[in-house]
Image (cartoon, rainbow, N blue to C red):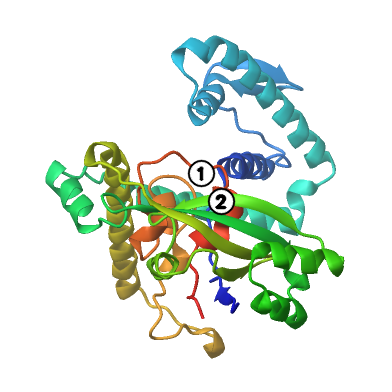
Amino acid sequence: MNTYHLAAMKTTSAPSTPKRVLCAALILVAASLSACGDKAKEKKPGQALASVNGEEVTVLQLNEELQRAGVTAAQQDTASKQLLQVLIDRQLLQEAAAKENLDRDPKVMQAIDRAKSLIIAQAYLQKRVGNVGKPTTAEVEDYFNKHPEFFSNRKQFSMSELVIGANDLTPEVRSAADSAKSLEEVAVWLDAHKIKYGRTQITRSTADVPPQLSSKLLGMPKGQMFVVKEGPRAMFITVNEVRDAPVTLAVAAPQIEQFLVNKKNKEMASAELQRLRADAKIEYLNKSMMPDPKANPSSPALPAGGAPTSAVAGADASPVAEAPNGAAANPNANDKAALDRGVAGLK
């Protein structure tokens, strides 16, 4: 059996929520370090809640942490006490770092400069494009009707896969897969050659995968194998079943609204960056670093993280990347990034 081979396009994805929270915390710590070594300390605004070696921790600092954590009114008392301890710990770490002159480390100073630049740029875009109006009912319905593949005609694929290390996907392994009639035959061959692999079952829909892949999957015979290679992994995948999985307008409307807001954010941010570039004098001192005239120079400049710029930076040119599907999140979604992030095409 001939195996279809897919080349996954390299993309940049937005970090997961836990990672974003951790990064934000590290940025806040790094930003605070810049003032630790100053001889004259400025008094922090706000009523003091605690003093750490003479340095005040204030109500304003605590309120900022509460807001970032999204604490509800019912949880505020307990959370306030816990977050105050976090602020105290942070202050202790800052002082310890300052004693070792880490606030003057070139890498730390560069990270602080980068964080400051991102925060200011993000604040500007937030001010300029952060008030996008909610799409109308007619706009939501129009998007729904124009994309039946995501909603009324949505199909769901039940698939099986074998996962191996990308380095193990040698020409010999590819040849064995091409001649195999099933995943089980591939597994037997891998066992015989002592190549480690894992087995998983995945479910994806036409709203989750790029159009070119969806059309190929819909026309693929049951049991046909294809290969996806991405990063450190390679996957042998077969489609076991294709079934109807329609989504109604009532269910899809909230996701469509969010998608349209994100799309509008991206369009407005791109327009603003184009305006700023048109008014600016940009000179490339190293001519080899000049962008391709056909490329869009604005996209890489968008700061990542936070609304609305997270939507701007994360929005794909194709609505598939953010297509709302009205269904519960698939538990295997994070492990199946190759199917989500755009496959170049079945060969």
Q: Residue at x 56, y 75 (%)?
A: 7
- Badge 2 is on which residue? 202
Q: Residues within 10 Å of mark 2 (few under 14, many from 20)?
A: some
Residue type at numbered disc 1: Asn
Q: Is residue 271 left or right of residue 322?
A: left
Q: Residue at x 40, y 65 (%)?
A: 218
Query: For the residues carrying marks 1 and 2, which lies nearer the camera in this image?
Result: 2
Q: Residue at x 57, y 46 (%)?
A: 16
Instruction: Give me the C-alpha separation between circle 1 and circle 2.
Output: 8 Å
Q: Nearer the viewer, residue 198 or 11?
A: 198
Looking at the image, which residue sits at the far front? 181
Looking at the image, which residue sits at the far left? 138
Image coordinates of residue 49 in percent, x first then y, are: 61, 15
The reply to whether the C-beta atoms of the residues labelled 1 and 2 are less than 8 Å apart is yes
Asked if 290 appears above or below 308 in the picture, the reply is below
- Badge 1 is on which residue? 330
Q: Quadrant of residue 186?
A: bottom right
Residue 331 visible here: yes
